[in-house]
Image (cartoon, helix red, strand yellow):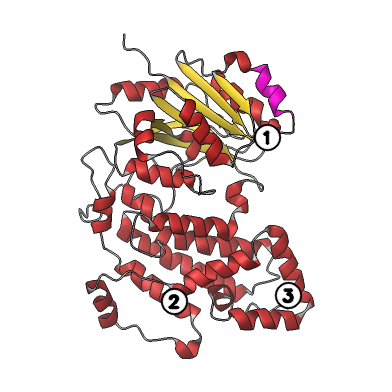
Amino acid sequence: MTELPKISIITPSFNQAEFLEQTIQSVLDQNYPNLEYIIIDGGSTDNSVEIIKKYENSLTFWCSEKDSGQSNAINKGFSRATGEIVAWMNSDDFYHPNVFQHIAELWVNAEEKPGLIFGDGTRSNKEGNNLENFWPRKPFFDLNALIYGIDYILQPTTFMNREYLLEVGLLDEDLHYCMDYDLWIKLGSKYQVLTTEKVIANSREYESTKTNTGGFNRIEEMRKMIKRYQPLEITPGIALSLMHTFRDFYQNQNGNFFTRDSLSSLEELITEISVSFTAFSNEGDGWPSQTSTDESIQLQAKKGMAGTLEDCNKVRTISPMEKLLLKLKNLCLPESEQPDFSKEQIESNQKRKIEIRCEMIDKLIDECIKLNNTCDDRLKLIKKLHSDHKHAANIIEKTENTLPFKIYRKFKPR
């Protein structure tokens, strides 16, 4: 009988006592015989430590001490892990039953040991209710689609080869929102990636999570991270996230800050971006395409489905995205300064293999970070704009060449 591989699970936690016990139970209730479970608490001041102590006889290691953030806590756990397979489960998420045995079987039966395994998952509200599947279709991996599209890998569903994790490096502790996204690209660019249709874990989604509070700071961090792996200043996936953030901002204000025409403009841009996805191994929704037959785009790896960054950088099918970026850039400029980008100019740019630098997009994100850094700051800004038209005019005058105020050229307070 083949010996089951050791699985090491790390749970980082800080002041999440309301969820922590369910997370711990979801790990221990797997009843996996070769489990190593590590909890790294960041010095919680709620009753998290009491909950951890309740289960300490089933833990390999735990500590409660200050750290420099989530990535640092997870890396502490990785450094102590000894399992062949490692994963982290955040303290507000949980595993579904009978998952570890399934992952172990995939591992044992693999012809070549993978760098990453991931599956389907569910998303729920804060209470763990209203579960819905994450994937709209069968889970599938394509490196090109991951880099140019959206992050279609649900973190709680992932398991990694510890040896390969150490080779590519642990989580980048300078990243606060997309450290997992960065890690998937690093692993997927060098090693085989296995997928499974099994529903692995649940991710809670509620207002105070980092994903939901990150706003433009999160998008800018992702944009800079993705820039490490491809030549575009902004990819279709990042552009889509940017437009969705603007749309969410509009909807959250119940139309009191933006006009209806502004929302229509955003929807048109979202449609244009969706069309551009098809040039990068993605479906129109940003998820990876399983039907692409274009060998220059659909990267097939020597090891499973994972491509290489070198191969990915050779793919320069950027015409649709280049046109989109030029359109975005036009939108950022005052009408009197909008140049006419001809077909010949676009083709010339392609021949020179230019690296598109959409400076107005950079200004956009910088400005939004300044103006909309937190929800409270944003609400204060809106109140100020509505109560002081002179102040609003000054802000618009200073930023009229940036996308926040160009997209909503009609963003004048009512």
Judging by the rendered image, the residue that carries numbered circle 1 is: 16
Residue at 25% in and 76% down: 347
Question: Does residue 271 lie above or below 23 as drawn?
Answer: below
Quadrant of residue 129 within the rendered picture = top right
Residue at 43% in and 52% down: 150
Which quarter of the figure is the N terminus placed in?
Answer: top left
Task: Estimate how packed mark 1 is, as few (under 14), some (14 to 19) or many (20 or more) residues with alpha carbons within 10 Å.
Answer: some
Q: Nearer the viewer, residue 64 or 122?
A: 64
Q: Amino acid at mark 2?
A: Lys
Instruction: Decide whether residue 48 is among the magenta residues.
Output: yes
Q: Position of residue 273 (x, y in %)?
A: 42, 65
User: Which badge, 3 or 2, is on the more N-terminal residue?
Assistant: 2
**Local SS, label 3:** helix
Q: Position of residue 364 (x, y in %)?
A: 53, 70
Disc 3 and disc 2: Cα gap in Å?
Answer: 26 Å
Q: Farthest bottom residue?
A: 336
Judging by the rendered image, the residue that carries numbered circle 3 is: 385
User: Which badge, 1 or 3, is on the more N-terminal residue?
Assistant: 1
Judging by the rendered image, the residue that carries numbered circle 2 is: 329
**Local SS, label 1:** loop
Disc 1 and disc 3: Cα gap in Å?
Answer: 37 Å
Q: What secondary structure do most residues of the magenta stretch adopt?
A: helix
Q: Amino acid at mark 1?
A: Gln
Quadrant of residue 277 within the rendered picture = bottom left
Q: Position of residue 324 (x, y in %)?
A: 39, 71
Start-end of magenta stretch: 46-55
Q: Amino acid at mark 3?
A: Leu
Q: Nearer the viewer, residue 7 or 202?
A: 7
Q: Position of residue 113 (x, y in %)?
A: 29, 28
